[in-house]
Image (cartoon, grey):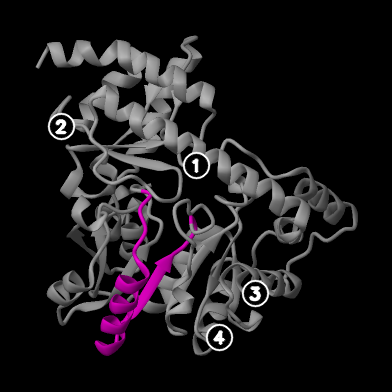
């Protein structure tokens, strides 16, 4: 095929560096090396037995056909009940759209709201695919540098400062990937009010909201009915490969999202949807809360361990399962540092270059979604390896 036929929008979509590191790690494993993976944001827990059993029953019962593009109604009702139970919010099931993962939810939201040639404000650092979802619809992600003094999150003052005639809206994440930090209730409320006054949209990615450790979690839906909220069964519910998520949108936006979903995805996986109904049963919820406590235990181990190794952790993450650490005391090139850690210590971490230019060379992201045994072994390996790096500086 003539590669000149490729669409020019591909020039605005960078490779996902963490996946390149994973390919290198798998090549080393094929050579017999033991590699500790702390790069990918994937829980080491899998779906509880009750969820697996629900999937098997759905298959045995022949529930394998297409569903509504909006998702099966019992699951939309269960998600609405989840908002009522956890956040005290009364959300109509008609506003909930079940999607083929949070990625599909973000694609649908951007397809509906991003106009070609416009820009969307988001923090730097942030999850790389978010800016690429915007680019996929010929928009531009306007990355605003956000430092530890504001928990690596956009502030209302920055939204006001960086809003231009081309700005269409903001895309936020709380808790965030890569930083594990949340936006405070008051600050998010001010951002939403500012964006509304400017006639823009606010999209809030809440896929890690179930993994909030230090305070009571809240949803942006408690602040406004006109925000678009993204969530997923991948993180708190441990169903990464099942590819199931959801959107909560204003009622007026549902027909547009339904039309897009019908054309772009037909529907989410029927089996995954029937399985997900079991996620909200008491037995499964008890499992998820135990696992959440384990994630917090891992965080409380790895943060001081990283600090002892020479990394700076200017903001202790309050959610998700990431630590965003400043590595400048050890190296001024996070990319080369992570390559050396992989090849010499057998530990996969991610350089900041994936998450935006502001912290590309100064920070690394660590995922503690792995066992305590692996975390302790990784720390031991890095303790032996890092002096060889600092000795060469």
Residue located 63% across and 83% down the image: 92
Residue 2 image label: none
Q: Mark 1 sits on what residue?
A: 296
Between the residue at mark 3 and the residue at mark 2, the CA separation in whole angstroms equals 45 Å
Between the residue at mark 3 and the residue at mark 4, the CA separation in whole angstroms equals 19 Å
Instruction: Looking at the image, tell me whether mark 4 or mark 2 is earlier in sequence order.
Output: 4
Crowding at mark 1 (Cα within 10 Å: few <14, some 14-19, many 20+): many
Quadrant of the image containing the C terminus: top left
The image quadrant that residue 186 belongs to is bottom left
The image quadrant that residue 64 belongs to is bottom right
Query: Where is 161 relative to 284, above or below?
Result: below
Q: Position of residue 21 (x, y in %)?
A: 36, 30
> Which of 217 and 199 lies nearest the eye of the viewer?
217
> Which of 343 and 9 lies nearest the eye of the viewer?
343
Residue 255 image label: 4
The answer to whether the residues at label 4 and label 2 have Cβ atoms under 8 Å apart is no
Crowding at mark 4 (Cα within 10 Å: few <14, some 14-19, many 20+): few
Residue located 58% across and 81% down the image: 95
Q: What is the magenta range?
A: 180-208
Q: Mark 2 sits on what residue?
A: 328
Looking at the rendered structure, the number of numbered marks drawn on it comes to 4
The answer to whether the residues at label 3 and label 4 have Cβ atoms under 8 Å apart is no
326 displayed left or right of 283: left
Residue located 24% across and 87% down the image: 198
Residue 80 image label: 3
99 displayed left or right of 13: right
Q: Secondary structure at mark 3?
A: helix
**Mark 4 or mark 2: which is in front?**
2
**Mark 1 or mark 3: which is in front?**
1
Q: Position of residue 309 (x, y in %)?
A: 27, 23
């Amino acid at each position: 095929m003539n590669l000149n036929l490729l669409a020019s929008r591909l020039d605005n979509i960078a490779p996902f560096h963490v996946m390149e590191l994973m390919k290198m790690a798998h090549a080393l494993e094929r050579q017999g090396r033991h590699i500790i993976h702390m790069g990918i944001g994937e829980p080491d827990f899998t779906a509880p037995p009750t969820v697996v059993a629900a999937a098997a029953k759905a298959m045995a019962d022949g529930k394998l056909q297409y569903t509504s593009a909006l998702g099966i109604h019992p699951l939309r009702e269960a998600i609405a009940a989840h908002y009522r139970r956890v956040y005290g919010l009364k959300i109509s099931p008609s506003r909930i759209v079940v999607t083929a993962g949070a990625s599909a939810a973000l694609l649908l939201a951007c397809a509906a709201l991003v106009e070609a040639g416009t820009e969307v404000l988001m923090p730097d650092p942030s999850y790389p695919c978010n800016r690429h979802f915007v680019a996929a619809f010929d928009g531009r992600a306007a990355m605003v540098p956000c430092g530890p003094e504001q928990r690596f999150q956009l502030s209302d003052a920055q939204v006001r400062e960086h809003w231009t005639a081309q700005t269409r809206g903001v895309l936020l994440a709380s808790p965030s990937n890569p930083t594990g930090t949340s936006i405070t209730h008051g600050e998010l409320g001010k951002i939403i009010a500012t964006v509304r006054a400017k006639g823009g949209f606010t999209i809030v990615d809440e896929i890690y909201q179930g993994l909030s450790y230090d305070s009571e979690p809240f949803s942006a839906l408690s602040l406004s009915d006109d925000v678009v909220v993204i969530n997923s069964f991948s993180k708190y519910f441990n169903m990464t490969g099942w590819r199931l998520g959801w959107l909560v949108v204003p009622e007026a936006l549902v027909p547009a999202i339904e039309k897009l979903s019908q054309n772009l995805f037909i529907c989410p996986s029927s089996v995954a949807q029937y399985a997900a109904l079991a996620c909200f049963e008491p037995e499964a919820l008890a499992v998820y809360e135990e696992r959440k406590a384990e994630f917090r235990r891992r965080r409380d181990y790895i943060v001081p361990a990283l600090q002892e190794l020479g990394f700076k952790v200017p903001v202790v993450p309050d959610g998700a399962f990431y630590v965003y650490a400043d590595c400048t005391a050890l190296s001024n090139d996070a990319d080369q540092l992570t390559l050396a850690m992989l090849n010499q210590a057998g530990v996969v971490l991610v350089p900041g270059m994936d998450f935006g230019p502001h912290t590309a060379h100064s920070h690394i992201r660590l995922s503690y979604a792995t066992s305590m045994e692996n975390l302790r072994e990784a720390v031991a390996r890095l303790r032996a390896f890092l002096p060889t790096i600092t000795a060469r500086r």
